[in-house]
Image (cartoon, rainbow, N blue to C red):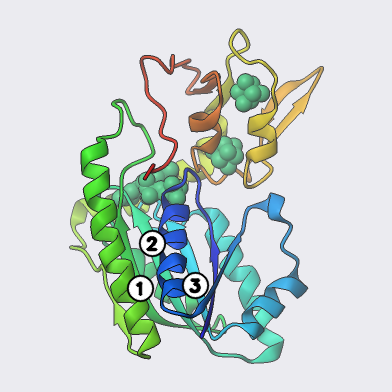
């Protein structure tokens, strides 16, 4: 069988999960491909259609933002629906979702968004790794390693289910009142995230890593204007976490990386 996965990963958790899944599938003698949906990857509509048509099963890899999907993934699913509409397909699909602390609404949101998209959700797995937003302490490596071990087991189970043609929707957590409130407020906070970002001019070396690596092309630099953050920002925290000097500010605050640790993905 051939599995092709489109994924978004702001800081590396979801990339780890989809790469781990692909390694499991390959070890079982099947084919597995990965496609990042970052703007910089320049996936054309024609290429997306070709990928879907050539695969037996399509994967979507995504983090969860406030019990919902990041705007970049929502946009990709809408685009996919338009691309698939004329060919009237109903391709089997699975979702690998990573999260930090609670994801009660993920499967519900994904099911809703995939309805009528040309993809039929047959498996969903929630992999708890660690939080990548508003982190004030270094990641607990012991905890993360345990979760990665657990994640590998869940991804193996997912692979076995898909290969056996079984349905498996896992990861419905308690849909609490607090969870519902977070979910209601997050889209607004995510949409306004770009307004909170800035650059600390004393520590910025103008290396342009943030500009070149932003998955939505939402950071512009101009000699006269300096840095501008645009509304297309998907609030992924990549610019903040990966600036070599920690010069990206949030809410106008410069956080010294020696004091406020950045999260740069799981290390095996
Ligand atoms: C804007 C934003 C909102 C988030 N909201 C949630 C959330 O509601 N629940 C949760 O468990 N994790 C939440 N997270 C944490 C991420 O889902 C988690 O760290 C994920 O594994 C990151 O994946 P990535 O490294 O592939 O980007 C949020 C992260 C961001 C950046
Ligand atoms: S990555 Fe950091 S140092 Fe490099 S241009 Fe962006 S803000 Fe400046
Ligand atoms: S501006 Fe920063 S937080 Fe927003 S999408 Fe780009 S890299 Fe992610």
Q: In this view, does 253 lie to the left or right of 135?
A: right
> Residue 194 sits in which quadrant?
top right
> Residue 218 sits in which quadrant?
top right
**Position of residue 261 measured from the top left corner of the image (x, y, whole percent):** 37, 24
Q: Which residue is drawn at 24% across and 35% down?
A: 140
Q: Can residue 185 be seen in this view?
A: no
Check disc 1 and report the residue beneath it.
Answer: 124
Relative height, residue 48 to residue 231 (above, below): below
State how far apart marks 2 and 1 are (Cα): 8 Å
Residue 35 or residue 210, whichever sits in front:
35
Check disc 2 and report the residue beneath it.
Answer: 97
- Quick check: is the Cβ at mark 2 less than 8 Å away from ligand 1? no
At mark 2, the secondary structure is strand
Relative height, residue 268 to residue 80 (above, below): above
At mark 1, the secondary structure is strand
Q: Residue at x 36, y 32 (%)?
A: 134
**Position of residue 28 measured from the top left corner of the image (x, y, whole percent):** 41, 78
The answer to whether marks 3 and 1 mark residues whose Cβ atoms lie closer than 8 Å is no
User: Which label sits on residue 61?
Assistant: none
Check disc 3 and report the residue beneath it.
Answer: 59
Label 3: how many Cα within 10 Å (few below 14, some 14–19, many 20+) = many
Of mark 2 and mark 1, the one earlier in the sequence is: 2
- Quick check: is the Cβ at mark 3 less than 8 Å away from ligand 1? no
Q: Residue furthest top?
A: 202
**Position of residue 84 measured from the top left corner of the image (x, y, whole percent):** 66, 82
The answer to whether marks 2 and 1 mark residues whose Cβ atoms lie closer than 8 Å is yes
The quadrant of the picture occupied by the C terminus is top left
**Position of residue 142 measured from the top left corner of the image (x, y, whole percent):** 21, 39
Label 1: how many Cα within 10 Å (few below 14, some 14–19, many 20+) = many
Q: Which residue is drawn at 52% across and 38% down?
A: 238
């Amino acid at each position: 069988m051939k599995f092709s996965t489109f994924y978004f990963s702001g800081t590396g958790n979801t990339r780890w999960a989809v790469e781990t899944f692909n390694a499991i599938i390959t070890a079982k003698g099947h084919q597995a491909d990965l496609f990042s949906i970052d703007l910089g990857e320049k996936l054309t509509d024609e290429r997306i259609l070709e990928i879907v048509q050539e695969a037996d099963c399509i994967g979507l890899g995504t983090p969860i933002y406030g019990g919902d999907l990041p705007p970049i993934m929502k946009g990709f699913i809408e685009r996919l629906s338009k691309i698939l509409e004329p060919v009237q397909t109903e391709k089997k699909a699975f979702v690998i979702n990573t999260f930090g602390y609670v994801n009660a609404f993920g499967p519900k949101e994904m099911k809703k968004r995939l309805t009528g998209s040309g993809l039929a959700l047959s498996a969903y797995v929630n992999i708890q790794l660690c939080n990548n937003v508003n982190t004030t302490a270094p990641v607990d490596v012991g905890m993360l390693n345990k979760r990665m071990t657990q994640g590998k087991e869940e991804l193996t189970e997912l692979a076995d289910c898909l290969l056996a043609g079984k349905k498996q929707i896992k990861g419905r957590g308690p849909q609490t009142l607090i969870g519902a409130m977070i979910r209601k407020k997050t889209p607004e906070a995510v949409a306004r995230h770009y307004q909170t970002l800035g650059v600390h001019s004393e520590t910025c070396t103008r290396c342009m890593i943030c500009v070149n690596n932003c998955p939505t092309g939402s950071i512009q630099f101009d000699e006269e204007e300096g840095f501008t953050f645009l509304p297309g920002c998907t609030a992924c925290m990549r610019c903040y976490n990966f600036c070599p000097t920690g010069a990206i500010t949030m809410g106008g605050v410069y956080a010294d990386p020696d004091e406020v640790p950045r999260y740069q993905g799981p290390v095996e």
